[in-house]
């Protein structure tokens, strides 16, 4: 699979990972972990609005919201909650946030399910953690698909 099927921001992230050696890829994942935005105040005190991705080894919760941009196109915002002591989980949430936040349903749904493998971390991270990453992407895509059906 090539990165040209990915949304621009996500393709650039994948290219950044692929340009590095494995130890440096883990360091980049840690940088994404540190860059994951905190939940907005309106979600912080409402855990019922977040859905847990149970396939992740660490407790990860996410939700999406849709909004219309000035042109009337519907865009999806991604929100994640993951503990600071779970840098791998937070890192992948950071990758998805930076790569997918603010895109249309079509753009998000077109991301291949095996996109996490493109990061080149399969030897550096346990298969269980890789499954968690894939599950996170799958959950986002399911939520976006359901929301986009409701929005039309």
Image (spheres, helix red, strand yellow):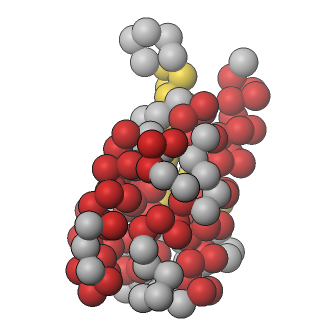
Q: Position of residue 119 (x, y in %)?
A: 42, 68
Q: Is residue 34 left or right of residue 66?
A: left
Query: Residue drawn at (50%, 81%), measured in percent from left and top?
Result: 122
| 48 in relation to 83, above or below | above
Q: Is residue 6 left or right of residue 54?
A: left
Which residue extends farthest top? 71
Residue 20 in sight in this render: yes
> What is the quadrant of residue 147 in the picture?
top right
Quarter of the image containing the C terminus?
Answer: top right
> What is the quadrant of residue 46 in the picture?
bottom right
Query: Residue drawn at (52%, 66%), measured in percent from left and top?
Result: 116
Q: Is residue 25 left or right of residue 150?
A: left
Quarter of the image containing the N terminus?
Answer: bottom right
Query: Residue drawn at (61%, 40%), measured in percent from left and top?
Result: 110
Query: Residue drawn at (27%, 86%), measured in percent from left and top?
Result: 23
Of the pair 67 and 95, the residue shown nearer to us: 95
Q: Position of residue 121 (x, y in %)?
A: 43, 79
Of the pair 135 and 40, the residue shown nearer to us: 135
Q: Is residue 32 left or right of residue 67?
A: left
Q: Position of residue 150 (x, y in %)?
A: 75, 27
Of the pair 131 and 64, the residue shown nearer to us: 131
| 146 in relation to 139, above or below | above
| 22 in relation to 90, above or below | below
| 46 in relation to 17, above or below | above
Residue 40 in sight in this render: no
């Amino acid at each position: 699979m090539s990165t040209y099927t990915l949304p621009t921001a996500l393709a650039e992230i994948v290219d950044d990972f692929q340009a590095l050696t494995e130890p440096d890829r883990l360091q980049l994942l840690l940088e994404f972990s540190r860059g994951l935005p905190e939940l907005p105040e309106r979600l912080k005190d409402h855990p019922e609005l977040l859905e847990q991705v149970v396939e992740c080894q660490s407790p990860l919760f996410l939700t999406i919201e849709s909004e219309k941009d000035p042109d009337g196109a519907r865009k999806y915002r991604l929100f994640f909650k993951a503990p600071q002591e779970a840098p791998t989980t937070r890192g992948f949430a950071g990758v998805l946030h930076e790569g997918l936040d603010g895109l249309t349903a079509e753009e998000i749904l077109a991301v291949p399910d095996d996109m996490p493998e493109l990061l080149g971390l399969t030897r550096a991270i346990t298969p269980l953690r890789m499954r968690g990453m894939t599950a996170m992407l799958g959950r986002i895509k399911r939520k976006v698909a359901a929301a986009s059906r409701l929005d039309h």
